[in-house]
Amino acid sequence: MDDPNTLFVVPHLRIQNANAISGNLTWGFPAMSAFIGVMQALERKAEKAGIDIGFEGVGVICHHHDAQVSGKGFTRTFNLTRNPVDKTGKTAAIVEEGRIHLDISLVFAVYGSDWEQNEAERASVAEQLTELLHSMRIAGGSIVPPIPGRPRPKPWMVRLPDDLEDQYKKFLSIRRRLMPGFALVLRDELLHDHYKTLSLQDPTVSRLDAWLDLSRLNMKSQAQEDGKVEWAVQRLPGWIVPIPVGYSALSELYDPGTVVNSRDTTTPFRFVESLYSIGQWVSPHRLKHPKDLLWYVDNDLEQGLYRLRNDNHLQNHREEQEI
């Protein structure tokens, strides 16, 4: 992803009943593909509204979350809703769905032509985009008004300097306004490094084994001086989480209309499966550059990969080089 020119920030959106099931194997926060979908849908709405703007990436900062679950410890159950009776008068089946209430801020990397250099025009475009955004759903959830008695936080749009050092200073003030909260970033390198470590111990280990090993709490025994054995949880530094990052093709790309019951007859169709990786929740003050926060689409059509990327790992690589 190229360095962004302009950032459009929508602070503290309150979302009710967003989808908490991010994939077949993960839950707890909407998948980043949901926010990429919001970005693409907002771009189409802006085009219809006559706003000359393009979107390159999106970042998410979570300030508060309330998963609609019951239970304690590691065993949780989704709070499900009973649907109305069907047309025969019988009780309708319960469809399991995971819901979560969120307080999040969205940061979009945008670009335009006429309005980018003018501060008043940037503010006007930000207001127009926010009005469009409030008419949409985010990750299946509804945007609700702020808590009574509190004003609605105003969105803003900021032009980033061309100089890299000046970008760092400008982003410093932006990220300060996004605290307290946690931003979700990609940590592909943790999965690759852990896979190499496990491969030295067991050559038959797979990347799925490494992903599962990173995703769970592992207990390790430690011998004490008095001869007793104490069990402790192995913890990696940071708030590490398993996340879906896109899809991988399972079939060839079929021509539009050739697959029965597909969504429409004008779009090519392909069967896919989910791709998973490792993410990390970090405080915004630890991010050095907007690219460390932003997610973007990075498809490889020849390989049949439809996935999302985040350049936070480049920051970690830069820090290792500086050390």
Image: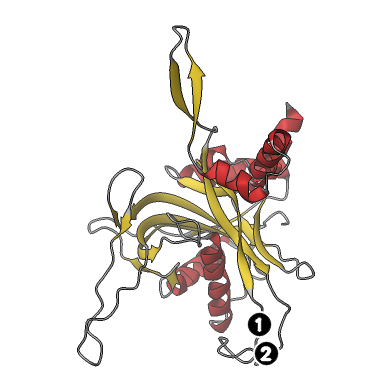
**Which quadrant is the N terminus positioned in?**
bottom right
| Image position of 265 with respect to 112: above or below | below
Instruction: Specify whether 295 is left or right of 103.
Output: right
Residue 90 at what x, y percent from top left? Answer: 21, 86
Instruction: Say which quarter of the image contains residue 252.
Output: bottom right
Residue 5 badge: none
Q: Are marks 2 and 1 in contact (CB under 8 Å)?
A: yes
Labelled disc at residue 269: 1
Q: Nearer the viewer, residue 54 or 266?
A: 266
| Residue found at the very far left of the displayed protein | 89
Q: Which residue is mark 2?
A: 256
- From where the camera sits, is residue 54 visible? no
Q: Quadrant of residue 138?
A: bottom left
**SS at mark 2 in the image:** loop
Residue shown at 59%/80% (left/top)? 47
The extreme top residue here reads: 226
Name the residue: 50% across, 62% down.
24
Mark 2 crowdedness (10 Å alpha carbons): few <14, some 14-19, many ≥20: few
- Numbered marks: total: 2
Mark 1 residue element: loop
Residue type highlighted by circle 1: Phe
Looking at the image, is mark 2 or mark 1 earlier in the sequence? 2
Location of residue 33 in the rendering, given as x and y in whole percent from the top left corner: 56, 64
Residue found at x 64% / y 91%: 266
Above or below 2: residue 280: above
Task: Please tell me how crowded label 1 is: few (under 14), some (14-19), or many (20+) other residues with Cα within 10 Å.
Answer: some
Check the image and report above or below for 105 versus 212.
below
Residue nearer the viewer, 142 or 86? 86
- Residue pictured at 52% horizontal, 46% vertical: 241
Whether residue 261 is visible to the viewer of this picture, yes or no, is yes
Q: CA distance from mark 2 to mark 1?
A: 6 Å
